[in-house]
Amino acid sequence: MNFQKYLDLAIAFIEINAVNVIVAFLILIIGFWLVKKVVKITKKVMSKSGVDETLQKFLGNLLGWGLKILIFITAISQVGVETTSFIAILGAAGLAVGLALQGALANFAGGALIMIFKPFKVGDLIEAQGEIGTVKEIQIFVTKLISPGNKLVIVPNGILSNGNIKNYTELGMLRVDLIFGVSYDADIKKTKEVLLNVMLNNSKVLKDPAPSVNVSELADSSVNFAVRPWATPENYWSVYFGIIEECKYALDRAGIEIPYPHQVEIRK
């Protein structure tokens, strides 16, 4: 009995609002078709602009669902459904979800900024938030790094995009900063020649910019030299450790002393 009553009411509603119902269906059908086209065009524009593929998909889906909700509200209002309360409920739900997920939203916004402005890319060696590593993957919420010790480091994109980022790969070369201390009895000119020759004879040290050796400090027990070779990011550590070892051998061969603390035994 109740079913027949509701059926009669539905038929009566359709008879009275037949035109509006047809218009509503047309709005839905045409609207959803247009949304599909708009999303497709938007993705093409983002692709030509170099926007990351992950961000393209996310923003495309976000745009698609937003437009579909708008079309749905327009369609039901066409048949006389009061949409004010419906919109208010959606707004309140959106606010509640936004407050609950504010950390996730901040990470999403940070990921979007990283993918748009590209301060680094996969394969770059970076330092950020006290971590250093090679970028393994840039996701919408986090960025994954591989540390020099082969550890996986996951950094939230929110704090990553708001902090300082050092990109060691972007410019294609790095300066290696080394300090060597020699005895005050050593000849400065000869010491500089020995240290410079070590760098010039190392195949992994770049010739442009040229390596340099300069007196950096007259310390308490040594004359300190700033040794500055340049290397590509992938050869940084090879140059760092290799130059230290080769300079020690070269200074020993040249008879140039590297001061170190001596223990003197006093006998009574």
Image (spheres, rainbow, N blue to C red):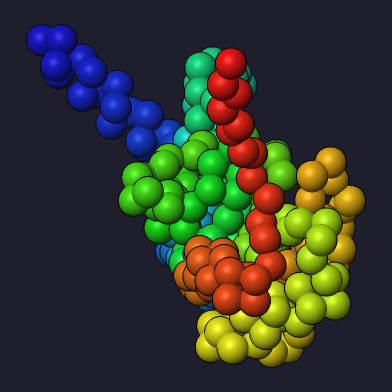
Q: Is residue 240 positioned above or below 88 on the image? A: below
Q: Is residue 145 left or right of residue 88?
A: left
Between residue 187 and residue 175, name the one nearer to us.
187
Question: Residue 188 at x, y = what percent?
Answer: 85, 70
Tell me the residue at 60%/23% (across/down): 266
Question: Residue 109 at x, y = what percent?
Answer: 61, 42
Tell me the residue at 63%/63% (across/down): 168
Between residue 97 and residue 132, name the one nearer to us.
132
Between residue 265 and residue 115, name the one nearer to us.
265
Tell me the residue at 42%/49% (across/down): 147
Between residue 222 and residue 143, name the one nearer to us.
222
Q: Is residue 231 left or right of residue 215?
A: left
Quarter of the view holding residue 201: bottom right
Q: Is residue 267 positioned above or below 172 on the image? A: above
Q: Is residue 153 positioned above or below 172 on the image? A: above
Q: Quadrant of the C terminus?
A: top right
Q: Quadrant of the N terminus?
A: top left
Tell me the residue at 51%/23% (across/down): 101
Q: Is residue 220 left or right of residue 119?
A: right
